[in-house]
Image: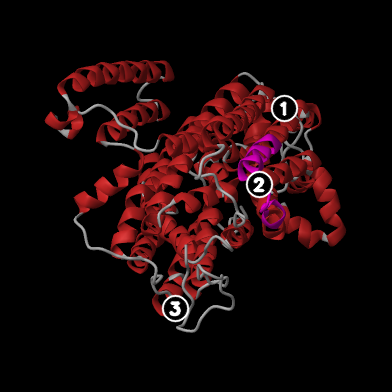
Amino acid sequence: MSISTPSSQPGPELQTGNIQHRGFSRAFYVANLMEIFERLAWYGFFAVSSVYMTTPSAQGGVGFTDLERGAVQGIIPFFLYLLPVLTGALGDQLGYRKMFLLSFAIMAPGYYLLGQAQSFWPFFAALSLVALGAACFKPVVVGTISHSTNDSNRGLGFGIFYTMVNIGGFLGPLLAGALRAISWDAVFMMSACWILVNFIPVLWFYRDPPSLKREKAPLSNVIREAQSVLGNGRFALTLLVAVLLLMCSGVEVLSYAQAFSCIGLWLVINLIWDRIASKVGPSNLSWWAQPMQVSNVRFALYLAIIAGFWTVYNQLFYTLPLFIRDYVDTRDLLNFIAWFGEDAVSFFAYVDSTQLQEAVQALHAQLHAGTQPTAEALRLEWVHLKVNVPASELSALMTHLQSLEVLTTIQLQQFTSALLAYRQINPEYLINLDFAAIVLLQILVSYLCQRIRPFYVLTAGLVVMCCAFALMAVELTAMGGAVIVTVILLIALGEMLTSPKSQEYVASIAPPSQAALYMGYYFVSMALGFLFAGFLSGWSYATLVQQDGRPDLMWALFGGLALLTAIALYLFNRYVIEGSTHEISSAPQTS
């Protein structure tokens, strides 16, 4: 695949026989810049989304239950990553620049409205707007990278792009963590501003890659082209209805048992449907009555397997921040940070002393009114104030408060000072270590792995993630900040090994005229991963952790899924890909 240079001058190096520039075009660098700003906006919200959605409304959040949180985090990103199948095809037809402008015009107001929503459905609608804009952005930015690279530099190009993704991902949560100390509204206004900034590079510097051959076509042709990559309309309909039934269980319209029963019945109906249709003959039937057909079985299997990786990886954002907030003692890390001064401690573990004093006063009034909460319930309530006080200390505090008829200002300040000893690091700052590691090491890892068979790299990344969750499952009795840092760095290594290579595979098999379309289909695996990740996170945290008190089972579930995905990927390469002309390599073949 050839790429363009910014001007009419030839690139710095040419390959003999098959002319390919080794440098990158201007579009490549502008796309990377826009990706940084878009990731600043997304991860500024996404890294704190679990905490924000489960924070009580009295403390600035929206007070969703874990099941509601899981439904939002599953359904909205599902459509965000599913729509690029269509928007990627539209980008190939209409031009990338127009799609960039459309995406920014949709996303900016969406982020602002997120901060104004105070209940489930308005929040759901605002986040849907953000998802629609992001779905217009994603396939064309990756399509630009694909058009701007070739066989000689594709691995490096995607490694650079992935580093830019994580620069935005690193800075976004840092800024969001600082702004939420002011107010949650400031977080969403910041995200909207980052999107508005992106109008500058796209209007002044970006032009569609010359290798993008645009052809005007009606929308029906675009949809047919999108369907042609994986299967016919019947195949899409069968999957869509099954997913919608699963979503109904996520929003508690159906129970999980009812949803899976309905999905099973729907699949049986489709099998009977296919038997009847095959006897009549597809040429005599409308699209909805034809037998299901999968156009590219190998690609469909690959996407289904990679969905397992995204299901596991997204627990870094969906489940781990809540677990850190509710159950992890990060004072060992704060003791280290204290070497850099009190300002550093206040930044990474900011606590609103006024809110904490109000909580102590409310507890004193509650105790003297004859109501005494359990120590564990009180601990889980106060973690929203960023202090994780041991249940034994809270029991002693309640006994002391109950003995006081009047709570003086001095006593209140003393209690508050004692509670500040249990302040905790904001979860988003710890999660940010994932981005920091990738920014520092992704290009090096991509360079070291460029001559290793890609599916071995993909499998190794999933095994590393399995080890990370296994560590969480066995270290519950000593869950401190150091363990969490180790887990996050292991997840980052797994991501560095798996994610760029998984995208590189799709870019290598996509025809040049359908680069964005194929990358749009890559996002289908992410869509399914987000859907399963959200529902699994909501169910497992509410049931296994909070109801049953067995977080070890939750982490074992995620670790087992990572291992199962690694095995499936190995078998896929061994029995489906090996020996195929479509097997990828990040370096030019020498034989």
Mark 3: give few (<14), some (14-19) or many (20+) Cα within 10 Å: few
Which residue position is annotated with label 1?
473
Residue at position x 40%, y 56% from top?
A: 516
Residue 314 at what x, y percent from top left?
57, 40
Q: Does residue 475 sit above or below 50 in this rendering?
A: above
Q: Would residue 315 appear left or right of 294 to someone viewing this image? A: right
Q: Which class describes the residues within 10 Å of circle 1: few (<14), some (14-19), or many (20+)?
A: many
Identify which amino acid the numbered label 3 is placed on.
Phe
Give how far across and how far down residue 544 sits, in percent.
60, 22
Gap in Å between the C-alphas at discs 1 and 3?
A: 49 Å
Report if residue 35 is visible in the image. Answer: yes
Say which residue label 2 marks.
497
**Alpha carbon separation for disc pair 1 and 2:** 23 Å
- In the displayed structure, 390 sits above or below 160; it is above
Magenta span main SS: helix
Question: Who's the residue at 19% across and 34% down the image?
Answer: 287
**Sequence-wise first label, 2 or 3:** 3
Residue at the spot of label 3: 205
**Which quarter of the picture shows residue 463?**
top right
Locate residue 400: give its quadrant.
Answer: top right
Start-end of magenta stretch: 446-464
In the image, what residue type sits under mark 2?
Answer: Leu
- Label 1 residue SS: helix
Q: CB under 8 Å between callouts 1 and 2?
A: no
Reply above or below: 200 against 253.
below
